[in-house]
Each structure stands twice: as structure tokens, then as C-alpha cells.
Amino acid sequence: MTSPGRIGPYRIERLLGTGAFATVWLARDPVLDSPVAIKVLAENWHHDLRVRERFLDEARLLRQLDDERLVRVHAVGELADGRPYSVMTWADGGSLRDRLTAVPLPTRAALDLLAEIAAGVAVLHRHGVVHRDLNPGNVLFRSGPDGERVLIADLGLAKALAAASGLTARAGTPGYMAPEQDEPFAVVDARADVYGLGRLGLRLLGAGTHPDAGPRRSVPPEVAALLRRATAPRPADRYPDAAAFHAALRPTPTPPPTPPPAPVASILHFLPARTAQKPRIGGRKCKIDGTSPRRRVGVLVLGVLTLLAAGATAGDDTTGRRDAGTWTSGPVTVRLPAGWRATGTGWAGQYGPDGRLEPALVMSPDPLRWAVDPTVPGAFVGLSASIAARTTPAGFVAERPHAECVAAPVRRTRQAGVDWVVARFGCDRGRPEVVEAAGLAPGRAGLLYVQVTPPAGSGADFVDALLAGVRVSRRYAR
């Protein structure tokens, strides 16, 4: 396939993929100087008014919903030959289909990921939309300052629930498609997506897509029962929608967080590594990172979580250890500024090659308030081998613009054997100052990322001293 030089004002870089109805290209927005994905209706369909309208409906729907769990549409246009295109968020982390060919996720990680997917589908159901084609290729990943986020994609087959009963065309992916989708005049509603979620759960747990297959590893009996109910042949025997399925993964739902002004870094797991429960917490993203405030919903699989205070999160001898003036998360140890404490044992949504959470922590005079109170200074520190495999420290810092802040020139500093790339942003609202820093840890340990909101009146010396206190175990830096 010949690559076009441009689509509208966007410079094409490479082909991302092709499907039955569309082709997707990676392009660059010349105004924002950022990558975007451009979806173009396939040539053999652009004369079919029904397919063309469905293509445009998808763009309109995603633009209307504009949710962080869905692929976002930024603009639409039309080629010279009349084919429509939509400009969308680029999911730089690829798809779940790509990752299922690699090493299987551990059970806990698989269930956590399934809960994230269900939360995305619940957004659609909450707005009266049924996806109808949930499969690994339509679950995408996008990196960000708080780790990877799951994005639900390809709503070209989606339809308002009110009109779903009139569906006559077969739509869906074999192995993930609900049985009623094969029946010409059957009512297709949110329960069809629940079936797809159940099939995705079985696939994540190693069962493949055979209708009679069950998980091929040891999973809690309540999870096996949950997946059996989700994939029941009769819609009436399934969960009513994705929200109910998601709640079944969280037997005692936790209340949503109070809408605070902003976490500025990553969502952490505030439990020791040996604890079986695995939480995710969050607030709203601040306008200082160029996005609108957005609600983040915590994820809790198979257990009830009470957030622990920093002093109560000490783990074993390698995770969450607190010595005098230091804190350790996996191989990462930090020296705490005077009066600061730390908490956290993992980087939520950021998994290493072994399927485990990569190490991270938050330190602050009040770590739990730092995420919600812009007057509280603090810092996030994380170590990621997976990020190091895809980008450089300078590239990672460049992925974190703060559009409503004034950027100082990027500087470099060498601290404790690490060459850091440091970007400082002065902001008129929210947190007055945000510093982004990244560097390669010694050996092959990975990329160290530090985000700092320094105390008022402090300068570069405070940031450099903090960076100098970040160290990686020599046993890990092999």
C-alpha cells in the first residue's frame, strides 16, 4: 500500500494497520507537534452511504463522549476522493492482541486489566451505547505520566441501545461475539458486551476462545463463577451491563474519590508487596498538564481496601522498607528531604517484562494529601524497564508538556551516577511549579522518572538534591 505524504494538514509517518472498513496511519500534528492516529474509510466502502455514515457516527460518538477510557477524536475531514477520515488519539502502547502473543500475565495482573477494560465499556453503557465487538484488537494502551491507560477503540459497530433491537447485520469477532449476535432479529444489548468481557477474561487467564474452555490456571473459585455467568449462552443469565460485571470484580465497592484539583504524577498501590489485594487510587488530573480535570476511578479486585497511612505500609525487606530518612520500593531507594515521608510499592498500570508492577513511590510531608492538595509539595519516583525499551529520557520528558504553564529551558544534570534530563514548568493555576525529570538507571535497570512539585521558594538545588538521593540497587542494575 502506498503511503500518502499528507492527509489534510497532517504529515504521514507510517501505516499502523488495516481492517475491513478502514486504514489507520500514524501522522504528526504540525500545530501541536505531536503524534496522532488518522483513520480513513477503506476505498471499497466509501460509495456505500450506510457504511460511510456508520464511520462518521463513530467519530461523532467518540467526540461526544470524550472520555479518558475511550479513544478520543480530535477532528474529522475528507480526502479529495470523498473518503472521510477521523483524527484520533494515538495508542502508542499497541493493542491487547499484540500482548497476548507474549508471556501470559499473572492472574492478579490479568484480573486487574480485565477490570480496567470493564470500566471503559461501562462508560459506553452509561451513555446508552453497546460496542458489540469487544476483542483484544479493540483494547489499546496509551502511555502517560501515570503509567499506561486502557483505551476502548473501534466503535464502528456500536449502536444506541434504543435502536439495537432492529439490528439485522451480523457483527462481531468469532470467539468473543455473543450467541444472539448470530440471530438476525435478536435483541442485542449491553449483555452482549458482558459476554465479550467474559471471553476476554478467559483469554487473559489462558483459556483461549473456545466456547467450552475454562481458565487453564488456578484462579479463585469466585472468579471462575463470575466468568461462567458472564459467558452464559442466554443473555438473561449474564450480568446486566459492564458496570455490574465490574462490580462483581469488586465485591465491596469503594466510594469514588472526592473531586480534588489534581494528582500530578502516577497512581500508586498503597499496600505491601506481599498483600493479596491490589488497589488503584486516583483523583483528577490538573489543568497544568494541558488536559481538563478528569475523574479517575479506583480499581479493586477480589478484596476490600483501606488506604494505609505512610507509616503503615512497610512491606518485606525489598519493598516499602522505611529506614531512617529513606524509603525503598523494590530496587529503588530514595533519601527523604527533612520532614518528608513516603508510601507506595508499585506503579499502577505499568508492568515489567515479568508481568509485575514496576516499582514506584510518592514522598511528601503528607503523601496522601499531595495528590489532592496543590499547596503540598512532593515527588513521584518510578523505575520502568518497559519505558526504557521504547524511548529515551529526553523523549519521555517531552511526552509530558504542561500546556498552560511556562516552560524553562531543559537542562541536564548528573546526580549519583545518573544523567538526568530536567524540565521545569511555572504555572499560574494549580501547583505553581512542576518539574519533570528522567534518566537511565545504571546498567540495564530501566528509566528513572521523577516528577517534583518543590516547596515554595526552593530552586534547582532542591531538585538536584532530591535527584541525588534516588538510587537503584546494584543487584538490579546488572
Image (spheres, rainbow, N blue to C red):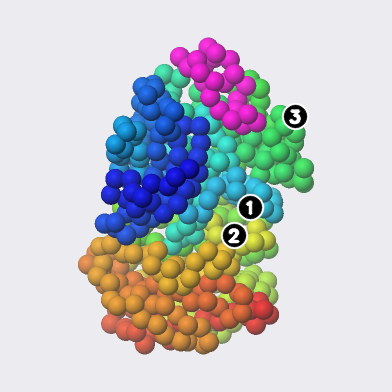
- Name the residue that disc number 2 marks: 351
Question: Could you tell whether 270 is left or right of 395 in the image?
Answer: right
Q: Position of residue 174 (x, y in %)?
A: 63, 29
The crowd level at tag 2 (other Cα within 10 Å; few <14, some 14-19, many 20+) is many
Going by the numbered disc 2, the residue's amino acid type is Tyr
* Magenta stretch encompasses residue 168: yes
- Report the front residue among 273 and 258: 273
The crowd level at tag 1 (other Cα within 10 Å; few <14, some 14-19, many 20+) is many
Query: What number of labels is visible?
Result: 3
Describe the element under mark 1 as helix, strand or loop.
helix
- Name the residue that disc number 3 marks: 212
- Report the front residue among 9 and 239: 9
Residue at the (65%, 64%) spot, across then down:
273
* Magenta stretch encompasses residue 57: no
Per the model, the C-alpha gap separating discs 3 and 2 is 30 Å
Main SS class of the magenta portion in the image: loop
The mark nearer the N terminus, 1 or 3, is: 1
* Whether residue 440 is visible: yes
| Magenta stretch in the rendered image | 166-188
- Quarter holding the C terminus is bottom right
Q: Are marks 2 and 1 in contact (CB under 8 Å)?
A: yes
Q: Are marks 3 and 2 in contact (CB under 8 Å)?
A: no
